[in-house]
Image: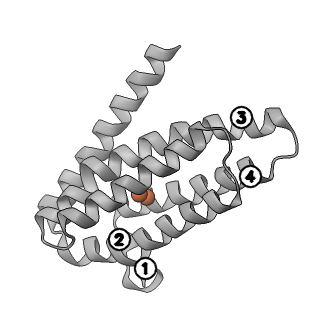
């Protein structure tokens, strides 16, 4: 269990965990917002943060765990498919409680299975590659938002 294994002592895992907290906070706001403008702002913030977070996982954590033999390629594909579904329900504008719970289950799965797996499987080289993937994702998403404005 993540709370006890010490995986959050590793900066890239602490970073992903912090993003999960913010993602779930924003997602709950989308579901529970009482004003349309509030919901729309939360939806936009959530979409931007999800794009960044998903990019970090799909270019960092998942392939590194596959390379270490800690998860299968199929498991990684399934998690990526869940990302697509989350993004689709958010883009459709009808993100409801059921979608929130699906998102929370995805987060829980990563925190209880993948993060502890990384903590025990990765050594210096993998942590450095994960860190580099995170910085590259930030650079990519930062560039994208600059191009949008
Ligand atoms: Fe994910
Ligand atoms: Fe995640």
Query: Residue 48 at x, y = what percent?
Result: 52, 36
* Mark 4 lies on residue: 31
User: Which one is in front in this view, the residue at disc 1 or the one at disc 4?
Assistant: 4
- Answer with the quarter of the image where residue 104 lies: bottom right
Residue at 65% from the left image edge and 39% from the top image edge: 43
The first of marks 1 and 3 along the sequence is: 1
From the viewer's perspective, is residue 24 above or below residue 132?
Answer: below
Residue at 12% from the left image edge and 59% from the top image edge: 125
Mark pair 3, 2: CA separation: 30 Å
The first of marks 1 and 4 along the sequence is: 1
* Mark 1 lies on residue: 2
- Residues at circles 1 and 3 in contact by the CB criterion of under 8 Å: no
Find out if the beta carbon at label 1 lies less than 8 Å from the nearest ligand 2 atom: no
The first of marks 4 and 3 along the sequence is: 4
* Mark 2 lies on residue: 115
Regarding mark 4 in the picture, which secondary structure is present there? Answer: helix
Residue at 18% from the left image edge and 62% from the top image edge: 73
The first of marks 2 and 4 along the sequence is: 4
User: Which one is in front in this view, the residue at disc 4 or the one at disc 3?
Assistant: 4
Query: Residue 9 at x, y = what percent?
Result: 38, 71
The first of marks 3 and 2 along the sequence is: 3
């Amino acid at each position: 269990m993540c709370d006890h294994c010490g995986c959050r002592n590793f900066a890239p895992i602490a970073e992903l965990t912090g993003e999960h907290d913010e993602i779930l906070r924003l997602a709950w706001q989308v579901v529970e917002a009482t004003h349309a403008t509030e919901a729309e702002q939360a939806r936009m913030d959530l979409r931007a943060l999800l794009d960044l977070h998903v990019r970090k996982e799909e270019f960092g954590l998942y392939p590194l765990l596959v390379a270490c033999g800690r998860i299968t390629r199929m498991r990684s594909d399934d998690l990526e498919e869940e990302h697509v579904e989350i993004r689709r329900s958010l883009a459709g504008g009808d993100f409801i409680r059921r979608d929130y719970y699906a998102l929370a289950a995805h987060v829980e799965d990563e925190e209880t299975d993948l993060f502890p797996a990384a903590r025990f499987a990765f050594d210096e080289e993998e942590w450095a590659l994960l860190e580099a993937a995170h910085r590259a994702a930030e650079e990519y998403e930062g560039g994208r938002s600059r191009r949008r404005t």
